[in-house]
Amino acid sequence: RSSDLLQCHGNSGYCWCVDKDGREVQGTRKEPGMTPACIPTVAPPTVKPEPRTDVTPPAEGTYLLYAQGQQMGVLPLNGTRLNKATAKTLLSLHGSIVVGIDYDCKAKMVYWTDVAGRTINRVSLEPGAEPETIINSGLMSPEGLAIDHHRRSMFWTDSGLDQDRKS
C-alpha cells in the first residue's frame, strides 16, 4: 500500500516517502500541507535479458515515425539502439496536438489526427509539400489512426464520440 510508504513528522508537518526498509527516499520531502506521491517501486532486474534469436534488428534505413505534441518527426533505427540526436523534425504544427499518426508507404504520405483542431490531415513527403486537412467535421477527439495501404482505406477512433470510423 502506498500509505505504508509515507512518513510525516508530527511537529513540523514535513512528509516524505520511504522505501520498504523505512529509509527516506531522496528528493521526496515536502513542506507542511503537501503530500509526496509515494509509489511502490520494484528493483530493476539483476540479470540482462538474453538476445532473442527470433527477432531481427531493423534494416539500415528503417525509421520510427513519431508524434510529440505539435511536432512529428523521424528517428533512424540503428539495430537495437536509439540515438535521439539523429532524430529529425518532419513538421511543426503550431496550435495542434498530434496524437494518431501513420504512414502510407504506397502514396508516401504521412497522416495524423489533431485533437486540438478536431481534424485528420495528411502531407506528402515530397519536398515543398503542404499539409492538407482531409476531415474537418464530425470529429470531437480523433486519436487512433491507421492506414491500410493495400485496400486504400483509413481507420480512426474518436474517444469523444466513442466511435471507430473508416473512410
Image (cartoon, grey):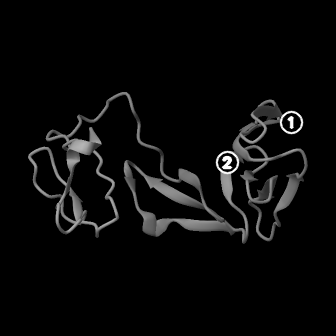
Q: Residue at (44%, 64%) from the top-left corner?
A: 84
Q: Residue at (73%, 69%) from the top-left corner?
A: 95
Mark 2 or mark 1, earlier in chain: 2
- Identity of the amino acid at label 1? Ser
Q: Nearer the viewer, residue 150 or 25?
A: 25
Which image quadrant: the N terminus? top left
Hey, which quadrant is residue 68 in on the image? bottom right
Q: Is residue 41 visible?
A: no
- Which residue was labeled with disc 2? 100
Q: Nearer the viewer, residue 140 or 76?
A: 140
**Where residue 31 sits in the image (x, y, percent)?**
28, 70
Which mark identifies residue 167?
1
Which mark identifies residue 137?
none
Q: Residue at (80%, 53%) from the top-left corner?
A: 118
- Identity of the amino acid at label 2? Gly
* Other-residue count near label 1 (Cα within 10 Å), few / some / many at <14 / 14–19 / ≥20: few
* Other-residue count near label 2 (Cα within 10 Å), few / some / many at <14 / 14–19 / ≥20: many
Relative placement, left or right, of 84 versus 105 is: left
